[in-house]
Image: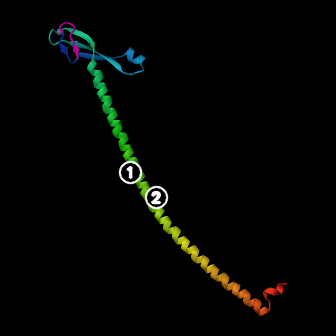
Amino acid sequence: MVKCPKCGTEVVTPVKKWSIPSRKAAKRGEKRKLVMGIFECSNCKARFRSAVTAETSAGETVNVKNMVERIKGIKGELMQTLKNLREKINTLETERSSLMIEIGELKKMAESRVSALEGEVNMMREEVQSLRDLLGYTEESGK
Ligand SMILES: [Zn+2]
């Protein structure tokens, strides 16, 4: 919104507008362009040039909207990542419990194998002893 230089009436929209690169903004490293416009006073019909100030705030509003949209997007991505992680955790927990069961079964199998071998070894010891007895060998005969 600008004021007519002749009568001071406020003019909202320009008849014509165009943007030029702002030297001040360029020095500050900003890409913002300065929007100029030709305004026509509704009261005295005077035409004058002025910077379009409303354009800047509209641009800033768009920026804020964009930022909000971006934040929403990032939030959505985070939610998706969390969901994926939860699913992964569930899968891993299921796999873990099935592996625990498998380990338990393997342990049982190994234990029964050990006891079977122990029984076999004991039988063989007894057999060796009985053969020694048969041949007349005793523990003292080795001297
Ligand atoms: Zn005027």
- Give the number of the disc on residue 83: 1
For mark 1, give the secondary structure: helix
**Quadrant where the N terminus lies?**
top left
Establish if 10 lies above or below 113.
above
- Taking the image in four quarters, ligand 1 sits in the one at top left
Splitting the image into 4 quarters, where does residue 129 fall? bottom right
Task: Judge from the rendering whether residue 114 lies leftward or rightward of residue 74; answer left or right.
Answer: right
For mark 2, give the secondary structure: helix
Establish if 113 lies above or below 52.
below
Query: Looking at mark 2, is its residue's CB closer than 8 Å to ligand 1?
Result: no
Residue 77, percent from left and from top: 38, 44
The prevailing secondary structure element of the residues shown in magenta is loop
Establish if 89 lies above or below 14.
below
The residue positioned 25% from the left and 16% from the top of the image is: 16
Splitting the image into 4 quarters, where does residue 64 fall? top left
Label 2 sits on what residue type?
Leu
The residue positioned 54% from the left and 74% from the top of the image is: 108
Distance between the Cα atoms at labels 1 and 2?
A: 14 Å
Magenta extent = 1-7
- Give the number of the disc on residue 92: 2
Q: Residue furthest top?
A: 6
Tell whether position 98 is magenta.
no
- Give the number of the disc on residue 20: none
**Quadrant where the C terminus lies?**
bottom right
Camera-side residue of 44 and 80: 80
The residue positioned 69% from the left and 84% from the top of the image is: 124
Q: Residue furthest right?
A: 143
